[in-house]
Image: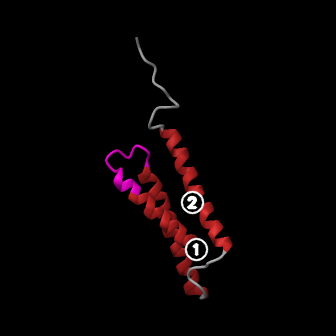
Amino acid sequence: MWLLILLFSAVISTALWYVKAEEDKYMLKFLSLILWGASIMVFIDHLIGYLLEGGYFIEISIESTVLGIVLVISALIIWEIALLVKDPKKVIHRRSIKT
């Protein structure tokens, strides 16, 4: 289930980035890259586990759903930190006005 949650989040963030691609003021490209990287990593993990151990490819349980939500929240936290460091609206680091 966590693979599906990450893929859904990656697709949504990519669509949002594509709509705002000219400006990319809020670094949506960075967010979509984080989510796509995590999705690819989880896909490879599921694929190797399925090929070596068998069983289900997509596990549907409460634990895997919570794990997917935690991973999306972690990606959003990393994106927020990067946004605060870049400060696209110059809210944190206001430039001094010379008079």
Q: Examine the structure image and report whether residue 65 is included in the region drawn in magenta.
A: no
Residue 51 placement: quadrant: bottom right
Badge 1 element: loop
Percent x, y of residue 92: 53, 31
Residue 32 placement: quadrant: bottom left
Query: Magenta region: which residues?
Result: 16-27
Badge 2 element: helix
Residue 91 to residue 46: above or below: above
Instruction: Classify mark 1: residues with Cα within 10 Å, few (<14), some (14-19) or many (20+).
Output: some
Q: Quadrant of the C terminus?
A: top left
Q: Quadrant of the N terminus?
A: bottom right
Residue under numbered circle 1: 1
State the colouring used for the structure image. secondary structure
- Amino acid tagged 1: Met
- Tell which residue pokes out farthest to the left in this image: 22
First of labels 1, 2 by sequence position: 1
Residue under numbered circle 2: 72
What residue is drawn where x is 56% and y is 82%? 57
Percent x, y of residue 39: 50, 67
- Residue 43: numbered disc: none
- Amino acid tagged 2: Val
Residue 71 to residue 97: above or below: below
- Tell which residue pokes out farthest to the right in this image: 63
- Tell which residue pokes out farthest to the top in this image: 99
